[in-house]
Every structure is written in C-alpha cells, then in structure tokens.
Image (cartoon, grey):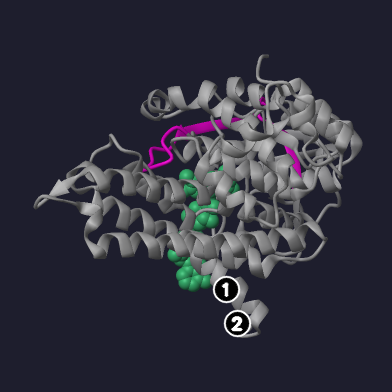
C-alpha cells in the first residue's frame, strides 16, 4: 500500500515507548518536518502549543490525514446516504498503517506506544467529514479491545486482538440492551456454563458496527450474584448459530455508521473465550469506558474547531445589509467565546490523558471532559448553524451534519447525567442508593 503504513509501523515498533523526536520525519521520505508542521495550520498551531504532543504525534497525524484525504473523505457523502461504510475495507487500510493498535502490545501487531498517541489519532480522525466513521473506528481501536489487551489470555489475543489491530476482523462492543443503557448493572443477557461452553441468551441494542462485525466484546451475566460482580466479558464470534442481527437502526445522525439490534438464542461459545476472570466484567467495562470517553472527547475537538473555522469563512464572505455577517460583533464575539471553550476542553482532556499515561485513575477528569464535550458540541453546533442561515438547515454543509452527529455525545458512552453521577461520587455528594 502506498500510504507509508509499512514504514510507520516499522518506526513505531522500533521506537516503542520512547520514540525518538522526529524519527519518522527522518526515515520516511514522504515527509519533511515542514510538511508535518504545516499540513493543517489550525491543527498544528494547536498541537505545537501542546504539552501532550511531540513531532512524532504530529507525524502520526499526518499519516492519518493522508489516508483520510485519499481513502475516506471523497466517499463520505455516498456512505452517509447508503447508511453504512465498508468497514472491512477501511479498517484494513488503517490496520496496514498501524493505526488500529497504537498503544497495543507489539507482539499482537500493536505499536506499543503510550495512550497519548491514541488521543492524537482520535483528534486527527475528527477531520473525517462525518461523525459515524470516526466513531466506528474508535469502537474498533479503543472501545472493544482495552480489556482484552490487558486481561485476555494470549490465545484470545492471538484470535481476536491481533486481527482487530490488523484490520482483518471488524469488532463491536455489546454492552447496552433495550432495557439497560445508563444502568449497565441491570443488563439481562445471560451466559450460563454448560461443560466447557457458555450458552448465551438475551439481546443487545445500539451496537455500532453490529451489522458488519466479525466478533463482539460481549458483557453478559455469568451468575446470579450481586450485579457488580456477576458479569463477564466474552469474545463472541458473530458467525455462531443462534446470533441474529434483527435490524439496522435508522438514526438522525451518524448515518454512515451501522447500528444494530442483535439477539442471542442458545448461542454456544467456548468458556476459554472469557476475558480475564469470571465475574470481573463490570469492573473491566468501567475501566474500558475511561478510554472510550477520552477518545470520544479528543475526536470531538477537531470537528468543533472545523465548524468554527468554516463558520468564520462563510460569514466573512456572506453579506447582509452590505456587510459581512462576521462583522457583527455578536457573531465574532460568540465565535471567540466558543473557541475559548474548545481550548478549555482541550486542556482538561490533555491533563486527564497525561495523568492516565502516568498510570493514574482519571475517572473523574475523563467524566468531566466527556460531560463538557457533549454540552459544548450541542452549544457550538447550534450557534454555528444559526450563522449559516438557510444554508445551515440544508444537508449540504458540514455544520448541519455536525449538528446532527454530535448530539450523540451527550447520550452515548454514558449520558451527561451518568457523567454527573460519577463526578458527584468523586465529590462525595451522591446519595447512597438503597
Ligand atoms: C448511535 C449509537 C451508538 C451506540 N453504540 C453502542 C455500542 O456500540 N455498544 C453499546 O453497548 N452501546 C451503544 N450505544 C448505547 C448507548 O451507550 C446508550 O444509548 C446510552 O448509554 C444511554 O442508554 P439508553 O439509550 O438506554 O438511555 P436510558 O438509560 O434509558 O437513559 C435515558 C436518559 O435518562 C437520563 N438519565 C440517565 N441517568 C440519569 C440519572 N442518574 N439522573 C437523571 N437522568 C438520567 C439521560 O438523559 C438519558 O439520556 C449506542 C447508542 C447510540 C444512540
């Protein structure tokens, strides 16, 4: 593949946890330091000011940007209309470039880098001209595999983690059910031991990649014990008898990402597909959520910035009453205020990520960032759309797609109120539940 994936993978696997500054730029003839810094004036201005990113993060972003420009963005409108993008084809391209497992162990095909690189990837993927495809990629790279990588047996990692990182298998995460979203502890899907197998019955709802997935990281009840200690994570191949993809759900946004409702009817899966210890699934999933939430925040920063930038450009050339819309103080002040909010969110996220990379529990900061990202995306997309007038109400501009897509941030991966409950727990203000 001509996307420099091979050299990128080589460089990163060589550099492991301590990449040499600028080493990609030296070794990869496609790049120069100047290119890496200038490829996107906006993004580079932000990242060069950042304490989180080095030239290596920037070079990684540049590689991703090339893939986005060549393999993804030209087709986004078509895939949005079709209600699905070709996950196997796109994940294979990303897998070849080493992008689906940047912080995963090298022995399973990952790049062995620290989590700040996942955040750089997530930010760059925000340049895709819709929310659905980055979300699907994030599910593959950062939402289905953290627990498997950390707690799974080497046999399981070979069977599920390695091909997911390489882009040979599409993964999905099966946590939510029709009757249990915010209250994860109340899921009903059961995996009952019978000999060396689990027999699975139940259903999952809202499953991103669910129509195309080859395997699911499934959360199921494996005993009748207390709700936080009776659950397990299981690697479930999606081609087993008894698995029914009931429907692809029609949504107001995230159109190119397929979202499925899935039923399990006496599905038999070997007990060796259990991730880590039986009964630890709830805890593993809560840990996994930390990465999912930080990834989601990073991914939201770029379209927020792009929406502001494109609104500036549009309102600068759009004249009403003989003056550019942008020249109204209420407009440029509002955009300045939103830009400030985006930078505040970025600082909060980078602080959480820096602490996480050092091994700290960042549940409180990650929850705050996720809460703020959802709130800000709603406010920002609404304000920007307003300044586009009638054009903002069409499907022809990025800002209206962002308005629809970003509404999910306050709902998925834990609604705003769930984030508030977690923050309250850390503040010691959440009343004890009876
Ligand atoms: C497009 C899309 C993709 C998704 N992808 C996946 C996936 O891949 N895998 C997966 O497992 N799940 C996925 N989800 C599910 C998602 O995580 C849930 O929708 C989310 O957790 C909310 O659950 P719920 O929809 O059941 O809402 P409910 O739990 O019914 O909550 C409804 C509302 O109640 C409010 N609420 C919640 N808690 C409180 C509280 N303590 N106090 C006051 N109000 C509260 C919130 O406003 C919330 O939005 C996806 C959802 C969507 C829409």
Q: Let me know if residue 251 is in the magenta part.
A: yes
Q: Is residue 227 above or below residue 381?
A: below
Measured as percent of width and height from the top left, residue 355 is found at: 76, 63
Whether the residues at callouts 1 and 2 have beta carbons within 8 Å, the answer is yes
Q: Is residue 172 visible?
A: no
Q: Is mark 1 within 8 Å of ligand 1?
A: yes
Q: Which residue lies at the image location 53% right of the left edge and 21% below the top edge?
A: 70
Of the 4 image quadrants, the one containing the N terminus is: top right
Establish if 156 lies above or below 44: above
**Residue drawn at (58%, 26%), measured in percent from left and top?**
66
Of residues 137 and 306, which is closer to you in this image?
306
What stretch of residues is rendered in magenta? Answer: 233-256
* Number of residue marks: 2
Rendering quarter of residue 169: top right
Q: Secondary structure beneath disc 1?
A: helix
Which residue is tagged 1?
421
- In magenta segment, residue 63: no
Q: Residues within 10 Å of mark 1 (few under 14, many from 20)?
A: some
What residue sits right under mark 2 in the picture?
A: 430
Report the quarter where the C terminus lies: bottom right
The x, y position of residue 284, in whole percent, is: 76, 55
Q: Which mark is residue 252?
A: none
Q: Residue furthest left?
A: 321
The residue under the point 82% across, 30% down is 11
């Amino acid at each position: 593949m001509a996307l420099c994936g091979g050299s990128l993978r080589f460089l990163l696997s060589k550099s492991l946890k301590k990449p040499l500054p600028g080493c990609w730029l030296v070794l990869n003839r496609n790049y120069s330091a100047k290119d890496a810094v200038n490829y996107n004036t906006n993004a580079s201005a932000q990242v060069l000011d950042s304490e989180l990113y080095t030239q290596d993060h920037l070079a990684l972003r540049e590689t991703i940007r090339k893939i986005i420009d060549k393999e993804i963005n030209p087709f986004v409108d078509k895939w949005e209309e079709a209600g699905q993008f070709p996950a196997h084809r796109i994940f294979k391209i990303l897998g070849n470039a080493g992008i689906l497992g940047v912080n995963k162990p090298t022995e399973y095909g990952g790049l062995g880098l620290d989590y700040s690189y996942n955040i750089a990837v997530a930010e760059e993927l925000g340049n895709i001209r819709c929310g659905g495809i980055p979300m699907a990629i994030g599910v593959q790279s950062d939402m289905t595999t953290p627990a498997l990588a950390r707690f799974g047996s080497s046999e399981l990692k070979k069977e599920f983690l390695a091909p997911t990182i390489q882009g040979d298998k599409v993964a999905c995460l099966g946590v939510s059910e029709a009757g249990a979203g915010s209250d994860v502890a109340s899921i009903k899907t059961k995996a009952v031991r019978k000999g060396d197998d689990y027999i699975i019955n139940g259903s999952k709802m809202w499953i991103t990649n669910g129509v195309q997935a080859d395997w699911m990281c499934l959360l199921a009840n494996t005993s009748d014990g207390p709700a936080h200690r009776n659950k397990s994570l299981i690697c479930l191949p999606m081609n087993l008898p008894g698995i029914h993809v009931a429907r692809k759900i029609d949504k107001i946004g995230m159109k190119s990402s397929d979202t499925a409702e899935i039923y399990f009817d006496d599905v038999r899966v070997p007990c060796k597909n259990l991730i880590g210890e039986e009964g630890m699934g709830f805890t593993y999933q809560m840990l996994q959520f930390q990465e999912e939430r930080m990834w989601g925040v990073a991914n939201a920063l770029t379209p927020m910035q792009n929406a502001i930038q494109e609104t500036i450009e549009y309102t600068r050339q759009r004249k009403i009453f003989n003056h550019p819309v942008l020249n109204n103080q209420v407009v440029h002040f509002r955009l300045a205020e939103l830009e400030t909010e985006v930078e505040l969110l970025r600082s909060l996220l980078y602080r959480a990520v820096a602490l996480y990379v050092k091994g700290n529990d960042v549940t409180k900061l990650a929850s705050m960032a996720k809460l703020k990202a959802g709130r800000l995306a709603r406010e920002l997309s609404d304000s920007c759309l307003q300044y586009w007038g009638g054009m903002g109400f069409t499907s022809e501009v990025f800002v209206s797609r962002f308005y629809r897509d970003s509404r999910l941030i306050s709902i998925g991966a834990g609604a705003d109120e769930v984030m508030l409950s977690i923050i309250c727990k850390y503040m010691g203000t959440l009343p004890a539940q009876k």
